[in-house]
Amino acid sequence: MWMTVVVIHNGTPQDVSNTWVETSVVKGP
């Protein structure tokens, strides 16, 4: 079935605004 994978990219503590989330859809079992 189709699964949604969310990858969280954390920035440095000095630059929290650098944190963003990447969402992608992959074909799984």
Image: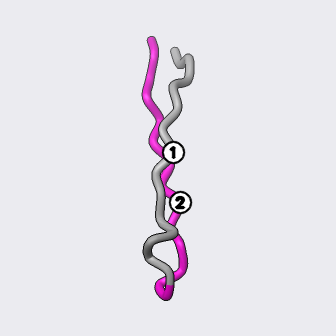
Q: Which residues are magenta?
A: 1-14
> Mark 1 = which residue?
22
Q: Secondary structure at mark 2?
A: strand
Colour scheme: one colour
Calculate the distance from the C-alpha at mark 2 to the C-alpha at mark 1.
Answer: 7 Å
Q: Residue furthest front?
A: 17
Q: Residue furthest top?
A: 1
Q: Is residue 6 above or below residue 4?
A: below
Disc 1 residue type (three-letter): Glu
Q: Residues within 10 Å of mark 1 (few under 14, many from 20)?
A: few
Residue 5 shown in magenta: yes
Tags 2 and 1 touching, CB below 8 Å = yes
Q: Residue at 47%, 35% (x, y): give it.
A: 5
Please provide percent x and percent y for residue 4: 43, 29
Q: Residue at 51%, 45% (x, y): give it.
A: 22
Q: Residue furthest bottom?
A: 14
Please provide percent x and percent y for residue 16: 44, 76
Q: Residue at 52%, 32% (x, y): give it.
A: 24
- Res 9 label: 2
Q: Residue at 51%, 25% (x, y): give it.
A: 25
Of the two numbered discs 2 and 1 on the same chain, state the one appearing first in sequence: 2
Disc 2 residue type (three-letter): His
Q: Secondary structure at mark 1?
A: strand
Q: Residues within 10 Å of mark 2 (few under 14, many from 20)?
A: few
Residue 6 shown in magenta: yes
